[in-house]
C-alpha cells in the first residue's frame, strides 16, 4: 500500500466529463501543473479521437515533462500505429470483455481479443514503449476468461494489466477479491480504474492497493464519464493518512487547491462543499465542544493537517452552538482583552442573537466590540 503510482487521467477520462472542452493551451497548463505536483503518469486522449487530439498529444510530449506521457487507445493495430508516432512514453490499451460490451459494442469473442491483444502488445514493445493492457467492465466479465487473457498477456511481457470498473458497480470487497486473485496469476504491475456511480471510487482504489495493485487512475475533482472516477485529491486524503511519509515526500500537496481551481474553472464547475481537503468547510470546526478541543490540540478532531496542504483551519464562532473558548480566541484575534467571565457573558449574547436568526462573522464581531466598549464606558 505504501508505494503506489498515480496515472492522472484528467486529460483523457476527464475530457469525457460532460462540461469538458480543453483547448491546447488549457491542456498544456493542466499537464504542467500535474507534472509539478508530482504525478507519475499523465494519460491523454487517443490520437485516433480527432486530428486536434493527435496534435495536442504531440505538443504535450514535446514539453519534456518529468511525468511519463501515456495515451489511451483501443486494442487495435491502427490506433496503436498512430499512437506510437506521437512521441508518448507508453500506451494504455483497452478492450471490452464483459458480455454486455462484447455483444452490444464491438462484437468480438475472447479468442479474437486475445490474439489481437498479443499482436498489439508485441508491436508496442517492439517500438520500445511501455504498454498496459486492460479490460473494460472487468467486474461484469467472466472471471475465468479474464484471468486466462491476463495470463496470456503477462507471458508476452506486458508492463501492466488493468482492472476497470467502467460502470461503477464494484464494492470494496469485490475489488479486494478480484485484485488479490489477479495478483496470484500475473507477475506484472496492476493498474486499476474506478468509476464513482455508487460512491465507492476512493474506497475501491484503496482496497485495490491493499490487495496488491500498483497503479491508480485518478482525475482532478474526479471528472469523467457520468459522475466520474477516483478524484486525485480524495485519493491523496486517504493515502496521506495511510502512508504519510511517502505521500508528503512525493507530492507537492500545497499545489492541490490551485490545480483543482484550474480544472474547476476550465470545466466551469465549483469545488463541492464537501470535497476532501479543499471543500470550503473541510477544516471548519463549529460545535463549542469541538472548538475547545481543536484550540487545545488540533488532532482531537482532525485526521488531516490543513498545513500539509497549505491551508488553514477555521474555528466557527458565529452560531448558537459556539462556546466561550472559541469566542475567547476571536476576542484575541480582534486585539481585545477580556477576563474569562467577560468572555462567557459576551458568548451568551452571541447565542441569544443566534437563536433568533442566522448570524454572520460581522454580527458576532460587532456584539464582541460593543460589549468590550461598554466595559470601558462604565468602569467599576
Ligand atoms: C471508458 C473506458 C474506460 C477505460 C479505463 C481504462 C473505462 O469506458 O471510457 O482503460 O483503464 O472506464 O472502462 O475509461
Ligand atoms: Cu473510465
Image (cartoon, rainbow, N blue to C red):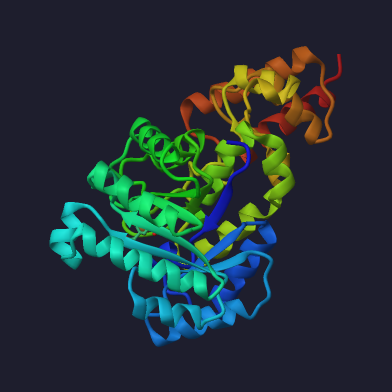
Image side of residue 337 versus residue 159, left or right = right
Is residue 352 placed above or below 209 in the rendered structure? above
Q: Is residue 290 visible?
A: yes
Ligand 2, seen in the image, is in the quarter at: bottom left
Give the quarter of the figure containing the C terminus.
top right
In depth, the one of 209 and 320 nearer the eye is: 209
Image side of residue 211 versus residue 100, left or right = right
Give the quarter of the figure containing the N terminus.
top right
Image side of residue 375 versus residue 362, left or right = right
In depth, the one of 149 and 190 nearer the eye is: 149
Is residue 326 placed above or below 220 in the rendered structure? above
Image side of residue 152 versus residue 57, left or right = left
Is residue 153 placed above or below 192 in the rendered structure? below
Q: Position of residue 236 (x, y in %)?
A: 58, 43
User: What residue is drawn where x is 68% and y is 18%?
Assistant: 293
Q: Position of residue 99 (x, y in %)?
A: 17, 53
Q: Position of residue 200 (x, y in %)?
A: 38, 39
Q: Is residue 279 visible?
A: no
Q: Position of residue 104 (x, y in %)?
A: 14, 62
Amino acid at each position: 500500500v505504501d508505494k503506489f503510482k498515480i496515472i492522472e487521467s484528467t486529460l483523457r477520462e476527464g475530457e469525457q466529463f460532460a462540461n469538458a472542452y480543453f483547448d491546447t493551451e488549457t491542456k498544456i497548463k493542466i499537464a504542467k501543473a500535474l507534472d509539478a505536483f508530482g504525478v507519475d503518469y499523465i494519460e491523454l486522449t487517443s490520437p485516433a479521437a480527432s486530428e486536434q487530439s493527435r496534435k495536442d498529444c504531440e505538443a504535450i510530449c514535446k514539453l519534456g515533462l518529468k511525468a511519463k506521457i501515456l495515451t489511451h487507445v483501443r486494442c487495435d493495430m491502427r490506433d496503436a500505429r498512430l499512437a506510437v508516432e506521437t512521441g508518448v512514453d507508453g500506451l494504455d490499451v483497452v478492450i471490452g470483455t464483459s458480455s454486455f460490451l462484447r455483444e452490444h459494442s464491438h462484437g468480438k469473442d475472447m479468442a479474437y481479443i486475445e490474439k489481437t491483444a498479443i499482436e498489439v502488445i508485441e508491436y508496442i514493445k517492439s517500438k520500445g514503449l511501455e504498454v498496459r493492457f486492460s479490460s473494460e467492465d472487468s467486474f461484469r466479465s467472466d472471471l475465468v476468461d479474464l484471468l486466462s487473457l491476463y495470463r496470456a498477456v503477462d507471458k508476452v511481457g506486458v508492463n501492466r494489466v488493468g482492472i476497470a470498473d467502467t460502470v461503477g458497480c464494484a464494492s470494496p470487497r469485490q475489488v479486494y477479491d478480484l485484485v488479490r486473485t489477479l495478483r496470484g496469476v500475473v507477475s506484472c504491475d496492476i493498474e486499476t480504474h474506478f468509476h464513482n456511480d455508487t460512491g465507492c471510487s476512493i474506497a475501491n482504489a484503496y482496497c485495490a492497493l491493499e490487495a496488491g495493485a500498483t497503479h491508480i487512475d485518478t482525475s482532478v475533482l474526479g471528472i469523467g464519464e457520468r459522475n466520474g472516477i477516483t478524484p486525485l485529491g480524495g485519493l491523496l486524503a486517504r493515502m496521506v493518512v495511510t502512508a504519510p511519509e511517502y505521500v508528503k515526500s512525493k507530492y507537492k500537496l500545497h499545489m492541490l487547491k490551485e490545480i483543482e481551481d484550474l480544472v474547476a474553472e476550465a470545466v466551469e464547475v465549483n469545488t463541492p462543499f464537501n470535497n476532501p481537503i479543499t471543500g470550503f468547510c473541510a477544516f471548519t470546526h463549529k460545535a463549542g465542544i469541538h472548538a475547545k478541543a481543536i484550540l487545545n490540540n488540533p488532532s482531537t478532531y482532525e485526521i488531516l493537517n490543513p498545513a500539509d496542504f497549505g491551508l488553514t483551519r477555521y474555528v466557527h464562532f458565529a452560531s448558537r452552538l459556539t462556546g466561550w473558548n472559541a469566542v475567547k480566541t476571536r476576542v484575541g484575534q480582534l486585539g481585545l482583552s477580556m477576563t474569562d467571565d467577560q468572555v462567557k457573558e459576551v458568548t451568551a449574547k452571541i447565542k441569544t442573537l443566534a437563536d433568533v436568526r442566522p448570524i454572520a462573522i460581522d454580527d458576532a464581531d460587532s456584539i464582541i466590540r460593543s460589549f468590550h466598549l461598554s466595559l470601558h464606558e462604565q468602569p467599576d
